[in-house]
Amino acid sequence: MRIQLSEHFTYKKLIRFVLPSIIMMIFTSIYGVIDGLFVSNFVGKTAFASINLIMPLLMGLSALGFMIGAGGSAIVSKALGEGKHRLANQYFSMLVYVAILGGMILAVIGMFLLRPIAILLGATGEMVELCVLYGRILLISLTPFLLQNVFQSFFVTAEKPQLGLKVTIAAGLTNIALDYLFIAVFHWGIAGAAVATAFSEAIGGLFPILYFARKNNSLLRLVKARIDFKVLLKACANGSSELMTNLSLSVVNSLYNLQLISIAGENGVAAYGTIMYVNFIFIAIFLGYSIGSAPIIGYHFGAGNHTELKSLLHMSLSLAGGCGVVLVLLAQALASPLANIFVGYDSELAAMTCHGFRLYAVSFLICGFNIFGSAFFTALSNGIVSATISFLRTLVFQVAVVLTLPIVLGIDGIWFAVTAAEALTLVITVGFLVNRRNQYHYG
């Protein structure tokens, strides 16, 4: 049965509504991991390390899509809650068109940045050429990838999370099948991984354009729209936390790689790459929940339903805590087999990866609260608070701890760094939730 944003949400109904978004994010993470899995096992750890070195730049360029999707959906869902359906469609359409233009511009800029960034991040010799080859192919599909990130949020706002899930699954299966074909069968190496990903991103980004451009039974449809700079600026401000998160992650991941190259060489980068791939799957639950619940929060905020807003916050915090405990236990149990799936061909590298992931996984106890806290304020159209949480969590605290902890703990300090950063951020998140409870009437 279709669940509408305007309904009262119990635990059961809330989980049913956000579940497609959670599965969508998990599946997105899994098919993103497939490139690394095939490259590591069929091409080698040098190519695998090359992907991990250049990936922060590619993810940084794609951050525009997350910003427009999260920040724009908050504005559109609020307009829907106020009963302004025509205006909601105009806002939605304008934001999609801006994402298309922005993706094209960033793709051109990225082409010039690939080689110098790869060298700056520590790549030498063959690794430089592999980074450039992989990056150039993926920049061709950057615009569809941006759109895929935008529509992940807007499918939920349109009350079509199941359709968003189907699109993501179709894109993911395409990537997995083509990875096998291009890498394992045709032996195209790292180029095959990039081409497979590009095809999958085209499906994930272009199909929603066709769907929303025609008449449909969702709340949203693409229409003619002029640029409203005031609304665009507000959407960017609302989504600045998502932008900051992805940009910061790009910078921090690069810093992690530099530290690991100096301490453990190529093996350190490969181990960290494996941990990041697995980490994406685990935290996808928190990210998917935040994407799925944000339009509900934005709608009830716009409609002035304070009791419902309070209930949604309490249920969300309880779910974040429970999921965190389960994920830590799973991580400890699965660390060894997951490491062997990626780098089982090298026993020393597999042991380093397993040990590192078990230490890193402690962060799952805390990160769910911070991820949801940032998304909660984005849905309330408070981009400043949301961005502050994300900025401290993903950049300031992580940079501080990854530069200091290894001095005391060696390589273990790198694996523990994220937990320390999440703990520091939790203090800030709790402070904002308590401080703003009367302003938004959820206290």
Image: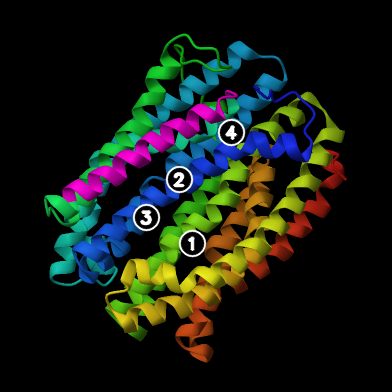
Q: Which residue appears at 48% of the width and 71% of the height?
A: 335
Q: Earlier in the sequence, mark 4 or mark 2?
A: 2
Label 4, secondary structure: give it: helix
* Mark pair 1, 3: CA separation: 10 Å
Could you tell me which secondary element the residue under label 1 belongs to? helix
For label 1, count other residues whose C-alpha is less than 10 Å away and answer few (under 14), some (14-19) or many (20+). Answer: some
Type of the residue with mark 3: Val
* Residue at screen point 73% across, 47% down: 316
Return the mark for residue 279. Answer: 1
Residue range corresponding to the magenta coloring? 158-182
Residue 390: percent from left, percent from top: 59, 55
Q: Is label 1 in contact with label 2 (beta carbons under 8 Å)? A: no
Which residue is denoted by mark 3 in the rendering? 33
Question: How crowded is the residue under tag 3: few (<14 C-alpha within 10 Å), some, or many (20+)?
Answer: many
- The residue indicated by pointer 4 is 234
Q: Position of residue 9 (x, y in %)?
A: 77, 33
Identify the image quadrant of the C terminus.
top right
Q: Looking at the image, which is closer to me, 340 or 55?
A: 340
262 or 296: nearer the viewer = 296
Say if 349 sits above or below 309 in the image: below
Q: CA distance from mark 4 to mark 2?
A: 30 Å
CA gap, disc 4 and disc 3 = 33 Å
Q: Earlier in the sequence, mark 2 or mark 3?
A: 2
**Lateral position of residue 37 relative to residue 355, left or right:** left
Q: Residues within 10 Å of mark 4 (few under 14, many from 20)?
A: some
Packing grade of label 2 (10 A; few <14, some 14-19, many >=20) is many
Q: Is residue 389 left or right of residue 105?
A: right
